[in-house]
């Protein structure tokens, strides 16, 4: 599976924005990561740093790509 193809969508300011794996990998600010997590419904409890947060966000996106129950029909 190509890393660039992994993505998730969320709504922000009444516009749909697509989050790609590369967007998460390039995060340098915890506030931006927190925004992604809120919009995606990702729980960040127990995480201690930005790298752990990125890993959790990536796992969420990957789960959505491989879980048929979460894919749009």
Image (cartoon, helix red, strand yellow):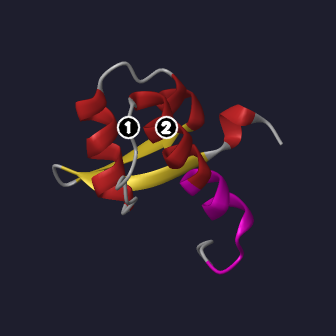
71 over 52 or under it: above or below? below
Left or right of 28, for residue 73? right
Left or right of 30, for residue 5? right
Main secondary-structure element of the magenta-colored stretch:
helix
Residue at mark 2 to residue at mark 1: CA–CA distance: 7 Å
Q: Is residue 62 magenta?
A: yes
Q: Position of residue 66 (x, y in %)?
A: 74, 63
Using the image as rendered, state which of residue 17 and residue 50 is in the foreground.
50
Quarter of the image that includes the C terminus: bottom right
Q: Is residue 53 magenta?
A: no
Q: Which residue is mark 2?
A: 52
Mark 2: few/some/many CA within 10 Å (<14, 14-19, 20+): few
Picture disc at residue 48: 1
42 over 18 or under it: above or below? below
Question: Judging from the image, what secondary structure is the residue with disc 2 in?
Answer: helix
Instruction: Tell which residue pokes out farthest to the left in this image.
Output: 13
Question: Judging from the image, what secondary structure is the residue with disc 1 in?
Answer: loop
Using the image as rendered, state which of residue 53 and residue 32 is in the foreground.
53
Instruction: Tell which residue pokes out farthest to the right in this image.
Output: 1
In percent of the image, x 16 and y 49: which residue is there? 13
Using the image as rendered, state which of residue 55 and residue 14 is in the foreground.
55
Q: Position of residue 34 (x, y in %)?
A: 28, 42
Q: Position of residue 56 (x, y in %)?
A: 52, 48
Cβ–Cβ below 8 Å for labels 2 and 1?
yes
Rendered image quadrant of residue 32: top left
Q: Position of residue 62 (x, y in %)?
A: 66, 53
In percent of the image, x 69 and y 40: which residue is there? 5
Mark 1: few/some/many CA within 10 Å (<14, 14-19, 20+): few
In percent of the image, x 55 and y 56: which residue is there? 60
Left or right of 3, for residue 73? left
What residue range appears in magenta? 60-69
């Amino acid at each position: 599976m190509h890393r660039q193809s992994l993505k998730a969508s969320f709504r922000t300011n009444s516009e749909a924005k697509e989050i790609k794996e590369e967007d998460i990998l390039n995060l340098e600010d915890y506030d931006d990561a927190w925004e992604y997590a809120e919009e995606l419904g990702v729980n960040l409890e127990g995480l201690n740093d930005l790298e752990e947060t990125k890993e959790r966000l990536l796992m969420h996106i990957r789960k959505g790509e491989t879980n048929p129950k979460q894919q749009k029909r």
